[in-house]
Amino acid sequence: MSEEQAVVSTPEKANFFRPVIQIAVMVTVIVSTILTIFAWPLATASPKSIPVGITSTVPNLVQGVQTQFDQQQPGAFKFIEYKDLAAAKSAIAHREVYGALVLTDKPQMLIATGASPAMAQVLTNVSVELGAQITAANGVSAITFAIEDLAPLGTKDPRGLGLSAGSLPLIIAGIVVGLLGSMRLRKTSQKFLVAALAGTLAAFSIVAILNLWLGSLLGNYFVEVGVVALGIAAVALTIMGAAALAGRVGLLSVIGLFFIIGNPLGGVALPQELYPTGLGTFGQYLPLGAEVNLLRRISYFPEASTITQWATLGAWLAVGVLLLVVASQRKPSKA
């Protein structure tokens, strides 16, 4: 082989192997990142400052209970004392606490399965352990805490699996609308219209399945349709706006934020207090986390405030509108 042929063949080999290696490395990085984001919060989930109410006929008992639990599980629970049973129940209804210990002559554990089936099970186990500890310490007859569920799940979906499984279509619907709108629609007005129309139609179908059929949602049907429609439109508009403004990079960045990050951190399977510090809270300010939290409040906690969740979804909708408007000013659409 001549020197000229060698010089020519070397770049050809490099051009042959370079894209193959790049794709292999990119896939490895992407898959590893996705696995980490999905698996890490679940694998390392542990309770941290879970708010639990406590009411008792013995004044200032909360400090003793807090100390006892901190010795066994440091920082796992944050006990908040309420003056009576009615106040403790009100706190649960307003989503201030996940449950409450009632330490009276008739000991109870108040839970709210609608807030989180996983947390309801944790608190039920806590009551069993506490009853055993009190029995052993005082040498009295076995103490059993009566369990009262203030926000039970629907009879059609007693394990609450419908909403957990349905959370994926909630976010996918917005992503699909955003992707198709970015690829097929050129005018900004068309993108606004498709987000509104597709979001509304999909919302009627999704809520019909989760509420009317499966019984996973128990709130007002039309209010829940509004929530889902707003969530889908917010995701779709943000994706289309990012794509119009920053092209493929913007498109993939927003999808990654909403799906790869927002899906596992949305607090669908586990309450935010069980995620690594800060991640659970962050997830509540992404569309899926706000949407699922809002649906739960409407279904099971009608007395609880929903301002933060509505505002979060509204803010993402505004972001999408702003991105599309800015993009249309920078690069006017052609007829």
Image: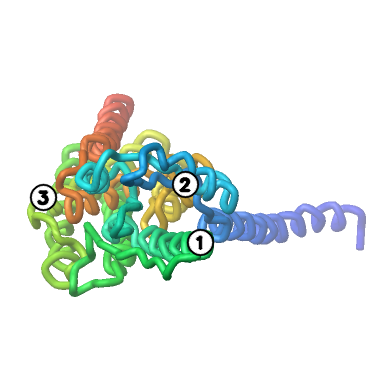
The residue that mark 1 highlights is 133
Nearest the eye: 278 or 331: 278
Determine the CA span between mark 2 and mark 3: 41 Å
Q: Residue at x 35, y 46 (%)?
A: 54
Determine the CA span between mark 1 and mark 2: 12 Å
Residue 159 in view in this figure: yes
Q: Identify the image quadrant of residue 5.
A: bottom right
The residue that mark 3 highlights is 223
Residue 102 percent coordinates (x, y) = 32, 52
- The crowding category of the residue bearing disc 2, from other C-alpha atoms within 10 Å (few below 14, some 14 to 19, many at least 20), is some
Residue extending furthest front? 139
Determine the CA span between mark 3 and mark 1: 45 Å
The local secondary structure at tag 2 comes to: helix
Residue 149 percent coordinates (x, y) = 25, 61
Q: Quadrant of the image for the C terminus? A: top left
Nearest the eye: 41 or 232: 41
Q: Residue at x 70, y 60 (%)?
A: 16
The residue that mark 2 highlights is 65
